[in-house]
Amino acid sequence: MSKVINKLNDLSEKLTEFNYSRYQSVLNQRMVGDIERIIENNSLNMNEAAKVCQMSRNTFKAKYEEAVENGIVPAAILKQNKYLFTLKHMHVLMNHFGLPKWSDRNLKTQVINLQNQKGGTGKSTTATTLAASLAIGLHERIRVLLIDLDPQGSLRNYLLPQENYSTDILTAVDLMLGDEEDGLYKAYREEGYTHRQILKNSIHETHIPSLHVLPSYSEDERFSQKAWLHYAKEGRLDHISLLKEKVIDEIRDDYDVIMIDTGPHINPLVWSAQYACDGIIVPFTPRELDWHSTCSFLCNLPLHLATLPNKGENVKWFKCLATNYNIEFGRDKHMMDEARRALGENIFSSQLVSSYAFEAAARNQCTIFDIKKVEGLCTDKQLDKALTYTETLKDEVLRFLEAVSSAQD
């Protein structure tokens, strides 16, 4: 054995001492004060809560107090002699009051893959922002699951760890490969947990009640290697179907929208997302080099889909979405116009605009919806710009999802 391998083995033993549970690592990176701040930033006062529930203040107050007395909802936060109703309070109360939500329409769950082979297009920011914007709306209360298939694993920064989980965090890849590996998944199965129980415990809550996350870690890179090794032996890429069979099919009915964020690669892990999805959103930045790279990706996409075991027949639609769009002085207008001419109906007319608010949110491990102007994390103008354009995009996406879901019924 070479000296380098011996050194690496010695180093591995030392590093193991610092290796603790994934759950604990996520818990440790979130300060209690930060979690409380984010929750309070999204809370409503009594008047706002009554308006959302389409009631007078007195009627809402009476119904709320009755719900507390009957143990349906915990008491609201009382701060500076004012009631604060968290998003969780509002979800429980609105469901208790029988107020309609998105799932009441019985629309087909949409599984969406966000993908572009070009790196730096803001896929993770797009996935997080779009998922949060859909889930945070109280009138729709859309149930959203965000699956991270990018081994970079940035989406786990938005987890809000709970103390009552009975298993450590497992990723989609851990769940997909669980039956063929010796690891935590197999250990949990031997303890008597069912696959669905392990899957449900691996999906984590966020500060938005209807937004859940299935995170990823760097070890997920092994999926493509195992898929290729199997292909070399058997001549089949059987692993590509595992995401659909082991994850999506098990929990599809629990959500209205399932979004899958993939890395800027073309490999079996990305193909598994293509195999499992109903539609594809391609984020792109309207700059010349980025647009040309996106054009190349779109030209090759039909070939990639046609080589899947199901020939890509599961994919019913695709849309492109301009991200990091600079609206100042018309700097990106020329490339945006060219993209619109080329894509026609296959591009959202709304965009995610360039705003410092997205950077401020990422640094503080939250979304733009969790920022209050008084915190001074970015200028009021930058926050207003990000929120206004994102709200417009959300409305367009909602109309589109309703249309494609109805068409598929």
Image (tube, rainbow, N blue to C red):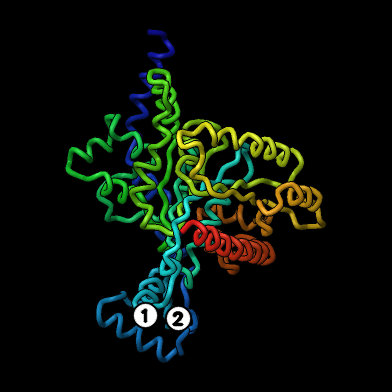
For badge 2, the amino acid type reads: Cys
Q: Position of residue 224 (x, y in %)?
A: 45, 29
Identify which residue is drawn at 29% across, 80% down: 68
Q: Is residue 308 visible?
A: yes
Query: Which residue is the extreme one toward the bottom?
Result: 58
Q: Position of residue 172 (x, y in %)?
A: 39, 41
Q: Is residue 10 left or right of residue 359?
A: left
Q: Position of residue 363 (x, y in %)?
A: 55, 51
- Helix, strand or loop at disc 2? loop
Identify which residue is drawn at 60% across, 68% down: 373
Q: Residues within 10 Å of mark 2 (few under 14, many from 20)?
A: some
- Badge 2 is on which residue? 53
How far apart are the alpha carbons under marks 1 and 2?
Answer: 8 Å
Q: Quadrant of the N terminus?
A: top left
- Badge 1 is on which residue? 97
Identify which residue is drawn at 50% across, 36% down: 311
Identify which residue is drawn at 48% across, 79% down: 52
- The quarter of the picture where residue 5 lies is top left
N-term-proximal mark, 1 vs 2: 2
Residue toward you, 266 or 330: 266
